Each structure stands twice: as C-alpha cells, then as structure tokens.
Amino acid sequence: MKIAPSLLSCDFSKMGSEIERMDKAGADWMHLDVMDGHFVPNITFGAPVYKTVRKYSDKPYDVHLMITDPLKYIDDFANAGADIITFHVECDSPIDETIEKIKSRGIKVGLVIKPKTPASAVFPYLDKLDLVLVMTVEPGFGGQSFMADMLPKVTQIKDECKKRGLDLLVEADGGIGEGTIAQAAAAGVDVCVAGTAVFKADDAAQAIEKLKSLCK
Ligand code: DX5
Ligand code: ZN
C-alpha cells in the first residue's frame, strides 16, 4: 500500500516544511488537492503555489484536480512539476482530449469518480489510464467520514482491468485512517490518500507506518 498525504490538511503557512516533514515520515506520494470553488464548494491553491513547493521533495506529486475545466490548466500543472494528474470524469472538459493532453506532457494520468458516479463511467477510458481514483467522501473538504459503500467500485474496476489485461493502480481518497484502511486494502486499493490521519497525528512517521501495517 502506498500512502499519499493530502496537503489539504497541512499548515498552509509553511507548506514547504510540511512537505519535507511528510517526505521524512515515509510518504510515498504527495497528494495536492486543487479546488476551484465551482466544481466543489471550496477553493485551495493553483499551479503557481505548487510550483514554489515542488523542490521540497523528490517523491511523485499527485495532483487531484477538482475543477470544472481541467484541460485549460494542464500545461500550468505540468510546468509546476506534476508527476501524476487526476481529473474528474464529471468535469466539463472533453475527457479523451484531456487524457491526451496530460500524456503529451509525459505525465501519468488518472480519472476520478465522485461517490454518486458508478465505476462503469471510467470503463471507456481504462485502456488510456495509469490509475483510477475512487472518492470515498464527497470531494471538497478534508476530515469527512469514510464511505465504505464505495469499495465495491474498487473491486469492479480491478475486475474490469484484469479482464482486459490492464495493470492500473486504484487510489482511494477521503476518510482513510487507522479504522478504515484495512477495508480499502482488502478491496484492492493500491494507493491511499490520507489527510487528517497523517497531518494531525503527533508522529507522522508512526502514523504512516501504522497505516501500512494495518494493510498486511
Ligand atoms: C477531499 C480531498 C481529499 C482530502 C482527504 O476532497 O480530495 O484529498 O484532503 O482528507 P481526509 O484524509 O482528511 O479525509
Ligand atoms: Zn484529493
């Protein structure tokens, strides 16, 4: 299991050192939530901010775009140093074109599904993707409760990939902590985003280690 701490739960006044803290604590990826106040009812930061913090870790930066028109901003996030870009299948941009745009910049690409969206919504694109992100809360805020009823979607996506001989990662995001990660692992999740559970822990390294051990 890979753990991707969500910077949404960090102290924004010292984002650089928060990233260093997560890097040293054993984070596998850095998860950066981008919200536009339109696709979701919250606003975070955009590419100019993330560009300034790219230098604080060599780990992959996993950018989760919760924005209405991701296609317009792919170049900005590519230039800011994104390694993985995920965007929502429910967005307004043309999906195929956005996937191609991300790939053309040499970046790994994933589609995200909100809780009300079925797994089958990403099936037409599976052959072109590196990963699928299944939301286990309504996107917009950290610290919400894990929706265990989203896990069958993970299994459905894994099964469909297996059928087609595809090797995709499935990521889960929202409400993941000590009490919920084992269920995610059992469903086949490869990467867990964790905001509150890691950033608000007294010892982030211990928290990450504990989360990983609960998956075994
Ligand atoms: C929610 C974000 C998540 C969030 C997770 O819209 O996509 O990445 O920060 O935070 P926790 O782990 O606190 O639920
Ligand atoms: Zn996220």
Image (cartoon, helix red, strand yellow):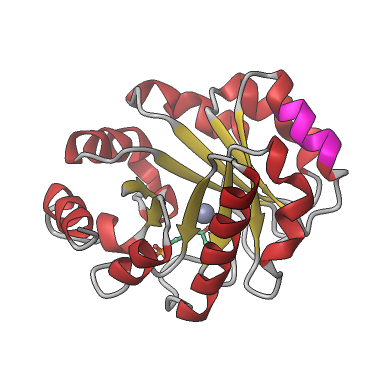
Residue at 56% from the left image edge and 58% from the top image edge: 159
Q: For residue 157, which quarter of the picture?
A: bottom right
Q: From this viewpoint, is residue 134 visible?
A: yes
Quarter containing the C terminus: bottom left
Q: Answer whether residue 165 is magenta in the image.
A: no
Horizontal arrangement in the rendering, residue 63 relative to residue 78 (left or right): left
**In the rendering, at what x and y percent does residue 165 appear?**
59, 41
Foreground residue among 190 and 94: 190
Q: Is residue 101 magenta?
A: yes
Q: Residue at x 59, y 72 (%)?
A: 138
Q: Is residue 90 left or right of residue 64?
A: right
Q: Quadrant of residue 79?
A: top right
Examine the image and state in which quarter residue 144 appears. bottom left
The answer to whether any part of residue 38 appears in the image is no
Work out whether 161 lies above or below 159.
Answer: above
Is 44 rendered above or below residue 103?
Answer: below
Query: x, y percentage for residue 67?
Result: 72, 51
Left or right of residue 116: residue 173: left
Q: Which residues are magenta?
A: 96-102
Residue drawn 76% across the image and 61% down it: 121
Q: How many marks?
A: 0
Residue in view at x 62 percent, y 62 percent? 42
Prevailing SS of the magenta stretch:
helix
Report x, y in % for residue 179. 26, 75
Residue 74 point in image, percent of width and height: 72, 31
